[in-house]
Amino acid sequence: LGFAFIQHPSLMFEQEVKTLYNSILSDKNCSVNLKIQVLKNLQTYLQEEDTRMQQADRDWKKVAKQEDLKEMGDISSGMSSSIMQLYLKQVLEAFFHTQSSVRHFALNVIALTLNQGLIHPVQCVPYLIAMGTDPEPSMRNKADQQLVEIDKKYAGFIHMKAVAGMKMSYQVQQAINTCPQDPVRGFRHDESSNALCSHLYSMIRGNRQHRRAFLISLLNLFDDTAKTEVNMLLYIADNLACFPYQTQEEPLFIMHHIDITLSVSGSNLLQSFKESMVKDKKKETKPSSDEETESDSNSGSESKSEEEASKPRRLRKRVNSDSDSDEENDINAVMKCLPENSAPLIEFANVSQGILLLLMLKQHLKNLCGFSDSKIQKYSPSESAKVYDKAINRKTGVYFHPKQTLDFLRSDMANSKITEEVKRSIVKQYLDFKLLMEHLDPDEEEEDGEVSASTNARNKAITSLLGGGSPKNNAAETEDDESDGEDRGGGTSGVRRR
């Protein structure tokens, strides 16, 4: 068929041919050899067409002076363009195939199509970004080269499709991932530990406006309203942790926006958890004026538990004399108010992963670049670019290892049965979040002593949330904090999760 179509391209417009080619390319169960053959046919056709055009061009130059331009019609390039429009979507979707040979031929077809200018390049940009994360260097380089060419001709196209490209690159990584139990990660598993999308970032980072818009779009995916799946958030956090940042402004801008997202999403998360407890209790008990005054009624225990879980704890943090027994009381108080239906608990555990990842990311960038808390807080995005134009002093041996999220994904908690132990761990996480939200902004305190107590409380909550790592990682006030990312990931979180 391939040879027939080279001689008679118009046959490719036939309905039977369109159905045959597109069904072979889009059917997941179809044999790999057949898919490759279809892609090869298209590739050979485009190569032959290119040769034919060059020959026609040479012939034209010989007789150019005698011919009348008005009568010349460039029919053949119009036909190959129409043919590629027919099969383009299916060829691009072949990028998500598990076999590298299928991806290889699909990329060849797209490269030929773009080089001949047969289609508008903007529709290919996200797919090329995705192919730039392929494990095979030759394919990565080819895809990256196409992006560079597009960027030269059409400034702004790459930035416009960058987030869509990141999402597609996650799909490519999912297809390549041979072990479904292992979460998809966003960096290369070699000594470089580069972000998979580092080339994309390096293309965007030169333009401050584009870079900021791109980073904000990625951080918005962590918002509780975005409902992004946890593994994709892990993939994006990996990329954000390993991007090739060059100036201090870049990580400081990310940390500044993480704080904003935390204050909004964190409050929403706590509010929805509280509401689920209150609502369910109201359904179970008929609220009457007597019951509300009785201390052992459900609504009474609810309000009492809220007080126990927040007020005394806050006071205890002020004087820094927190004891395990008090923490146990808080957990037990909230445990009494949990609804029968465990869906809100699962929802909380699920949504909280996004916030945990942001906390981990901020902590990682802080350790990687050696920023102090005061430097992070003094940063303002509206200041002139020159203030933070200094090069980053990267620490070595600092790795991004969000242990809690990895445990959450490996244990498949979203679909597993909720045990009493898991409930306790989620409640503990809720109380730590609560504490963190109370002390999120140390500037609110006025006296010096109060500030340090608040900072200590915040750092203690972060340490607890991130898996009980050493507090010095979180309370680091020096520029040369050498703490390792893996220390923070350690601790008891894995045990509690399991």
Image (cartoon, grey):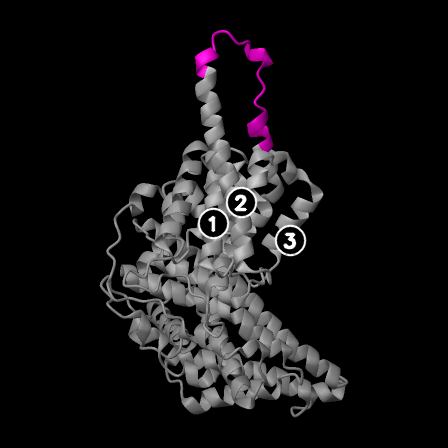
Q: What's the residue type where badge 2 is placed?
A: Asn
Mark in the foreground, 2 or 1: 2
464 versus 329 height, above or below? above
- Which of marks 1 and 2 precedes in the sequence? 2
Magenta stretch containing residue 160, yes or no? no
Query: Residue at label 1?
Result: 105
Q: Which residues are magenta?
A: 61-79
Q: What's the residue type where badge 3 is placed?
A: Ser
Residue pictured at 60% horizontal, 88% vertical: 336
- Which of marks 3 and 2 precedes in the sequence? 3
Q: What's the residue type where badge 1 is placed?
A: Phe
Q: Which mark is residue 41?
A: 2
Q: Within the image, what quadrant is residue 442 found in?
A: bottom left
Q: Within the image, what quadrant is residue 491 found in?
A: bottom left
> How many neighbours does mark 1 have within 10 angstroms: few (below 14), some (14-19), or many (20 or more)?
many
> How many neighbours does mark 2 have within 10 angstroms: few (below 14), some (14-19), or many (20 or more)?
some
111 versus 447 height, above or below? above
Residue pictured at 53% horizontal, 77% vertical: 412
The reply to whether residue 371 is in sight is no
Asked whether 203 or 334 is in front, the reply is 203
